[in-house]
Image (cartoon, helix red, strand yellow):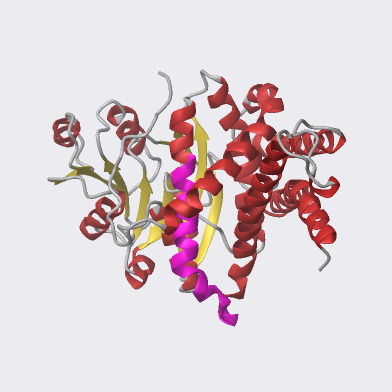
Amino acid sequence: MDQNLLLFTLFQFAFFYPMVMAFFWMSGGLYYYFRRERKSRPRNDPPPLEQYPFASLLIPCHNEADNLEDTLGAALAQRYPDFEVIAINDGSKDDTGARLDAMAAIHPRLRVIHLDRNLGKANALRMGALAARSEYLICIDGDAMLEEHAMHWLVWHLTSGPRVGAVTGNPRIRNRSTLLGRLQVAEFSSIIGMIKRTQRVYGRIFTISGVIAAFRRTALHRVGYWADDMITEDIDISWRLQLDSWDVRYEPNALCFILMPETLKGLWQQRLRWAQGGVEVLLRHGSALFRWRQRRMWGVLLEYIFSVCWAYIMLMIMLLWVLGKFIPMPPQLYIATLLPQWHGVILALTCLLQFASSLIIDRQYETHVGRSYFWVIWYPMAYWLINLTTTVVALPKTLFKRRGKRAIWTSPDRGLR
C-alpha cells in the first residue's frame, strides 16, 4: 500500500471511529429500548414468578466500615420473599468486622464470613459462593445500594431459562457533588448503558458490571469461579461464561447506586485498572475466540481491538504534532493543530445526539437525570482522552506484568462526601 494512502487511511480512521461507534451504540441502544424496554413492566412491578426460589446476596467487604450501614440496609430491605445476605470481611484493617458482627446479631438474614488477610475480591466472592445455600447468587460491592426490587428482577432472569448463566444490572452514580461526578452520571447513561444494550442486541456482553451481577452457581462451578490473578475479575468471568456457551444478560431495571471517583487521580487509577483488565482478558482468552463456535464473541473482540488501535493512532497523531513544532515535517505528516475544527464540531454534535438518545431511554430510571446533562459539553473530550491514555499505558504495563500474581484489594476513591 502506498505510504500516503496508509497515512490518509489512519487519519480517517482516527476521525471516523468515534463517530461510527457513537451511531452504532445509539442505534443498538434505541433498538433494544423500543423492542424490549418501552413496553416492559414498571420497575416497581417486576414479573411474577411461579415459585420464588431461595437466593443468596454476596457482599465482599474490605475496609468498608463507612458504607456498611447504607449497603446492608438496602440489601436487607429487598422486596423478595426468601433470601440471605452473606458479608465477606476480607482482611479489613478498620472496624468492618466488628460492625458486621454487630449487625448480624440484629438481622437473622445476615451471615458474616471473616477472612484473616486480604486475598482479593475474587477470593472473597468464591468463599461467599461456597458458603451460600442457593443456586442463585447476587453479588454487589461493599459500597453499593440496591434498589428494593433489584433482586427480584435478577432472579427472574436466572429462572427464565437453564442456559442463563449471569445477569448484569444497571449501576447509577450516587455522588454528584463535583464536575467529575456529574460527568460520570452522563457516562453511565449515554455510554455504558448504551453499550450494554447494543452488545445485548448482538448477543454477547464485553463485561458484566462487577458492582451488581447475578450468577447461576452451576455456571460458576463449570468455569471455575472467579480468577484471583485477574485485575478485573468481572471482565474475566464474563468472557469465561460466554466462552462456555452460557447466556449473559443485561437488566436495566435492576438498579444499584454506587460511589465513583471524584478526583482525577482516583478516576485515572480506576480507568487504568479497567483498561488493564481488558488487555489481560484478551491475552488469556483471545486465542479461543478464533473458533467458529465462538463467532458470537467476534463483535465484542473487534470492538475492543478497534478501540486499542484508535488509541495508538491518536498517540501517533499527537507525537507528529509535537515533532512538527521542532523539526520540518513532510506535508502528509504535518499536523497543524490538535484543537477541534470542523470535524471536531461534527464529533461534538454526534456526542450530543447520543446524549439526547440516552435521555429518552434513561429518564424512566431517574426522573431528574437530565439535570446532569448540562455538563456533558465537556464529556466527549474527557471520555476519549482518558480512554486513549489509559489504553496506551495499560497495554505495555500488562504485557510486562508478572504472571500469576494475586489481585488484592486496594481502597478506591469513593468521591467527596
- Residue 246 x, y percent position in the rendering: 48, 69
* The stretch drawn in magenta includes residue 282: yes
Q: Quadrant of the N terminus?
A: bottom right
Of the pair 38 and 32, the residue shown nearer to us: 32
User: Magenta stretch: dominant SS?
Assistant: helix
Q: Is residue 167 above or below residue 359?
A: below
Q: Is residue 226 left or right of residue 254?
A: left
Can residue 346 be seen from the camera position used here?
yes
Of the pair 45 and 233, the residue shown nearer to us: 233
Can residue 246 be seen from the camera position used here?
no
Residue shown at the point (60%, 54%) measured from the top left: 308
* The stretch drawn in magenta includes residue 13: no
- Start-end of magenta stretch: 271-293
Q: Is residue 317 above or below residue 8?
A: above
Q: Is residue 62 above or below residue 176?
A: below
Q: Is residue 414 left or right of residue 126?
A: right
